[in-house]
Image (cartoon, rainbow, N blue to C red):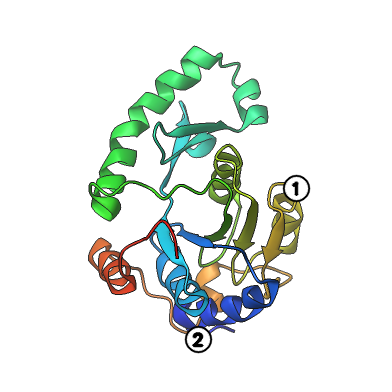
């Protein structure tokens, strides 16, 4: 059982540091991934940034992800092809649904990033971080969007996730660091002693504490 997100970050950093990542960029999935990623960036002396993902829900079931928008310039639309096909949606219909979610993606980007541009990850080692994985939908979209940005290597770092989800994500990420893979998998919060919900203000404080996300370190 993990004590808290900070401890989870130190645990992951200890393993990642043995891989000698080249010019790493640590990307956190807000909100929960930010304190985990901040510890990894601190230990590795790496640049820290965020990657905002917004789900695009089905017309009759907003909780069912048809696709996801991933922050970028422009944002990447990553489709869940099987689900899109099951709904019989053509590209124009999917894009129309995605347009509804763009304002919220932009709001979150402005909240966490302001006017600062995202780091260029081309040719660098990207460490994608969250505080855990349940279904893997958001992480899969993030990994596919990152692949389009031509990183040299992608390491997915999460402290806890179900083994079957890790097996699926292994097709998307070059390397996965996940020390806890319990069976059966319970609710994510049950794998932490201290797992509070984070506010936007707390996320911004952690990012400010980490300092500017320099393009080269």
Q: How far apart are marks 1 and 2 (CA)?
A: 30 Å
Residue depicted at x 29% and y 54%:
112
Up the image or down, 120 lies above or below 205; here it is above
Percent across and percent down for residue 143 are 59, 47
Up the image or down, 209 lies above or below 63; here it is below
Percent across and percent down for residue 38 are 42, 72
Image quadrant holding the N terminus, namely bottom right
Q: Name the residue under label 1.
A: 171
Among numbered discs 1 and 2, the one appearing first in the sequence: 2
Observer-nearest of 151 and 177 = 151
The residue carrying pointer 1 sits among few (fewer than 14), some (14 to 19) or many (20 or more) residues within 10 Å by Cα, namely few
Q: In the picture provided, is 83 more to the left or to the right than 101?
A: right
The residue carrying pointer 2 sits among few (fewer than 14), some (14 to 19) or many (20 or more) residues within 10 Å by Cα, namely few
Judged from this view, the residue extending furthest toward the front is 216
Residue depicted at x 63% and y 54%:
154
Q: Mark 2 points at which residue?
A: 3
């Amino acid at each position: 059982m993990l004590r808290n997100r900070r401890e989870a970050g130190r645990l992951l950093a200890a393993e990642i540091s043995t891989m000698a990542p080249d010019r790493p960029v640590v990307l956190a999935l807000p909100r929960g991934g930010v304190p985990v990623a901040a510890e990894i960036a601190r230990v590795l002396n790496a640049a820290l940034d965020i990657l905002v993902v917004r789900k695009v829900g089905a017309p009759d079931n907003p909780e069912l992800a048809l696709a996801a928008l991933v922050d970028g310039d422009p944002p990447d639309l990553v489709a869940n092809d099987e689900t899109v096909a099951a709904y019989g949606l053509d590209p124009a219909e999917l894009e129309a649904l995605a347009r509804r979610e763009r304002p919220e993606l932009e709001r979150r980007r402005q909240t966490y990033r302001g006017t600062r541009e995202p780091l260029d990850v081309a040719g660098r080692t990207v460490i994608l971080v969250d505080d855990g994985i349940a279904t893997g939908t958001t992480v899969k979209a993030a990994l596919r969007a990152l692949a389009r940005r031509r990183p040299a290597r992608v390491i997915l770092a999460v402290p806890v996730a179900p083994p079957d989800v890790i097996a699926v994500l292994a097709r998307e990420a070059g390397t996965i660091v996940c020390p806890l893979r319990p069976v059966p998998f319970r609710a994510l919060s049950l794998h932490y002693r201290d797992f509070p919900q984070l506010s936007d203000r707390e996320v911004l404080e952690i990012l400010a504490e980490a300092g500017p996300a320099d393009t080269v370190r």
